[in-house]
Image (cartoon, rainbow, N blue to C red):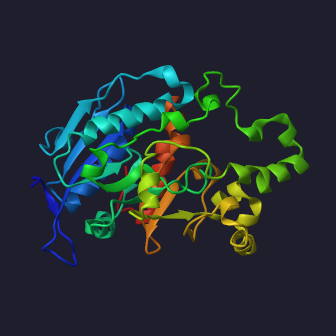
Amino acid sequence: MRSGIYAFDMQNVSRPLSITIITCAMKFHEPFLVANYIGLRNFSRSIRWIIVNNDDSALDLPREIQNDTKVEIQKGPPLDTTYGPISIGVHHAKSLKIAAWQVKTNHTLILDPDFVIIDWQRIFQEFNRVNEDQIAAFGTPWFPTWYRKIVNSLAPHCVFIKTNVIQSDFEWYPISKIPEYLKNHDSTINAPRSQWPIFKIKIFKFVLLHFFNRIKINTEYDTFGSTEILAKQNRILFLTPQLTRNQLAKLSPFLKYKGGRTFERLIPRRFRYLTRHYSVAPFELSDSTQHIEHWVVGEEIFGIHMRSFGAEKLLSKDYSAVIEFGMHLEFLTGGRVSF
């Protein structure tokens, strides 16, 4: 039997869950790691957390975290740039795999470094459903604005999964299924279609948003490819994304309105931007914070994800994304959680 720390099922305390958290982080993720650490320790003082540092620089975390015997910070593997633009994703997947093989508990929580959980108790109550034998994993699908991603695959942002699943023949990154053009080092080839000159013309932009983009839905593989197979076996539960009206408008201007969302449900499922259950936020985001993703349980936000737009800012040493994220976090929690 595996040894480990337990979070008890609120409905059935005779069935404890043993848990280890694994996170792959860069130096600019330090504020997020601290925020999650505080929330985690307020929930449980004893859950083990493996943090893989994928940066060249050491993580400068508070002494409390460094001295916590349940937190293990280790160096990640060297970055292999063979795969061009997707090399970062492949590197992330390799680091997750290395950390996964160090887990000794029955369950693993894979947590993105910029995914801040603001209600640990609420989400762990949901995760307890994975204790049922027929369910292998429970977590975040790809946020709807990433409509090209495989619908039945989990996104490794916040995933609670049985450890034996990821310690077996698990495909962390399905490189063989990635189109060659996505591996190309020439950034001009990979430029977003929306930046093509022809789509500056209103009529062609309309066609792009309302018709052409829809044929790209559910076509792009990414990290966690094996979970598509699990989903086909009905062994996955998905958490619910919450979109703001301007995030819906990014998919299609019509979706900003109730009428547009009603029409979306009439379109054949293969061509829907909104292919699974979601909710609409009772607030709006500013232009600078539209990248932030909200995730809910029972319509209540339990966690938010800064996402790659903010990461690009941080890589360029522009820390405004962290400030914006922190202000939004305080807004959502009434100041209870902050950086």
x and y percent of residue 233 in the render? 42, 61
Vertical arrangement, residue 279 with respect to residue 186, above or below: below
Vertical arrangement, residue 189 with respect to residue 155, above or below: above
Q: Residue at x 28, y 32 (%)?
A: 60
x and y percent of residue 253 in the render? 76, 60
Vertical arrangement, residue 124 with respect to residue 28, above or below: below
Left or right? Give the position of 247 relative to 130.
Answer: right
Vertical arrangement, residue 49 with respect to residue 242, above or below: above
Q: Residue at x 39, y 37 (%)?
A: 93
Q: Nearer the viewer, residue 285 or 273?
A: 273
Q: Residue at x 54, y 43 (%)?
A: 221
> What is the count of numbered marks?
0
Q: Nearer the viewer, residue 20 or 219?
A: 219
Say which quadrant the N terminus sits in.
Answer: bottom left
x and y percent of residue 143 in the render? 54, 55
Residue furthest to the bottom in view is 11
Left or right? Give the position of 275 relative to 138.
Answer: right
Left or right? Give the position of 284 relative to 138.
Answer: right
- For the question of whether residue 314 can be seen, the reply is no
- For the question of whether residue 102 can be seen, the reply is yes
Left or right? Give the position of 173 relative to 218.
Answer: left
Query: Based on the displayed image, in which of its 4 quarters is residue 44 positioned?
Result: bottom left
x and y percent of residue 8 in the render? 17, 68
